[in-house]
Amino acid sequence: MTTLPPCAPLAAPVLALLEAGCAVSCLRDLTRGGLASALVEIAETRSPFFAGMAGSRLPIAVAHGEGRAEFASAADEAAAAALVTMRFVDNHGRAATRYPANPNGSPQGIAGLASEDGLVTILMPHPERVFRTVQNSWHPAAAGEDSGWMRMFRNARTWVS
């Protein structure tokens, strides 16, 4: 995997959504257009954004095709498996491998990655577009105003407090 040179020591976690994440070497083409939603599952990760969220399956906004994770070799892809923060999953909770459940065709359904220390997190879909329950493609009838994604933003606030 290509290693980016350090810019400066990090004092706080960094969240890079697609537009910023396109600069990261493992992100590649925009493959499909349109606006849709998909289902992701949060993985065990060191990213403070996802503290206490492992195993959560949440609908997420998918816009403009999303950045596709691409790796130079099978070894790089295998190494990235430990850095996954979220995956696109099908309705059975299995890693999605095909469109539409995996809207960008990323291997292993990868939808987000974090650095080894968890301080840099890159995401291909858009949780900032679905932080309220009414913004989700589906939600339980008894859901409150905040969607499950609000936890990610509260985690960030907790980390810096």
Image (spheres, rainbow, N blue to C red):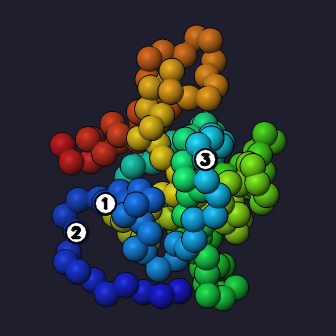
Density class for disc 1 (Cα within 10 Å; few <14, some 14-19, many ≥20) is some
Between disc 1 and disc 3, the foreground one is: 3
Q: Which residue is mark 3?
A: 34
In the rendered structure, which disc, 3 or 2, sits on the residue that comes first in sequence? 2
Q: Which residue is mark 2?
A: 10
Residue 74 lies, in percent from the top left, at 70, 85
Q: Position of residue 99 (x, y in %)?
A: 76, 54
Which of the two discs, 1 and 3, labels the residue nearer the N terminus?
Answer: 1
Residue 69 x/y as whole percent: 59, 70
For the point 44% across and 26% down, the residue is: 132
Q: CA distance from mark 1 to mark 3?
A: 27 Å
The residue at the point 40 percent across, 74 percent down is 23
Residue at the image position 45 percent from the left and 59 percent from the top: 18
Q: Which residue is mark 1?
A: 14
> Answer yes or no: do the residues labelled 1 and 3 have beta carbons within 8 Å?
no
Alpha-carbon distance for marks 1 and 2?
A: 8 Å
The nearer-to-camera label among 1 and 2 is: 1
The image quadrant of residue 80 is bottom right
Q: Amino acid at mark 1?
A: Val
Are discs 1 and 2 less than 8 Å apart at CB? yes
Quarter of image, res 131? top left
- Secondary structure of the residue carrying tag 2 is loop
The answer, for residue 156, to whether it is visible in the render is yes
Which of the two marks, 3 or 2, is nearer to us in this view? 3
Name the kind of residue labelled 3 in the image: Gly
Query: Does residue 154 lie above or below 16 as drawn?
Result: above
Q: Amino acid at mark 2?
A: Leu
* Residue 38 position in % (x across, y down): 65, 43
